[in-house]
Amino acid sequence: MNQQEILTASAKLQAALAEFTAVMAGVSVAQPPAPAAAQPGLYTIAQFAKRNHEAGRYPGNERAIRHLLFNAQQNGLEDSGAIARLGRRILIDEQKFFAWAARQSRAA
């Protein structure tokens, strides 16, 4: 599955989840989802590690990312909205992840 397919699938899942949530809340969903190109950069752990390694950014390996994810509730990553869990698959929103990381460095 390439990145574009993942983004398209993610957009469809987000739209379905929004519609389901609205139905459960008794609200109608009138606006269509944003096109896939406008969706945030969602990456699997392996893809995220590879992008960071190639760009020379931390975390540049899967082990470091998995450590952050394992401790996501304690370190605030869970609440940042940077993690999307779809069954067993974990997708990382790149923009939200680095915004969280910037807040962590300011808080230290």
Image: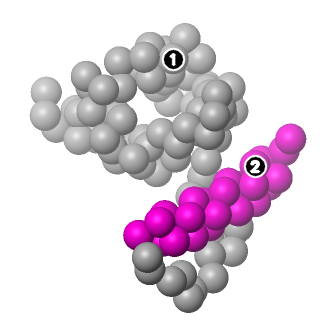
What residue is at 63 percent from the left and 34 percent from the top?
Answer: 87
Tell whether position 10 is magenta: yes
Q: Residue flagged by tag 1: what amino acid is it?
A: Arg
Q: Give the residue at x 27% y 33%.
A: 76
List the residue tagged with mark 2: 6
**Horizontal side of residue 88 vs 66, given as left or right:** right
Q: Which residues are magenta?
A: 1-25
Q: Picture coordinates of residue 68 (x, y %)?
A: 41, 20
User: In the drawing, does residue 63 fall left or right of residue 68?
Assistant: right
| Dominant SS in magenta | helix
**Residue 92 appears in the rendering:** no
Residue of label 1: 66
Is residue 53 depicted above or below 107 in this figure?
Answer: above
Rate crowding at label 1 as few (under 14), some (14 to 19) or many (20 or more) other CA atoms within 10 Å: some
Q: In the current view of this chain or complex, which residue is farthest to the bottom?
A: 30
Q: Is residue 27 magenta?
A: no
Number of numbered markers: 2
The x, y position of residue 49, in whole percent, is 61, 26
Look at the picture and state if 86 lies above or below 22. Answer: above
Q: Quadrant of the N terminus?
A: top right
Which circle's residue, 2 or 1, is located before the other in the chain?
2
Front-lying residue, 81 or 46: 81
Secondary element at image label 2: helix
Q: Amino acid at mark 2?
A: Ile
Q: Residue at x 55, y 11 (%)?
A: 63
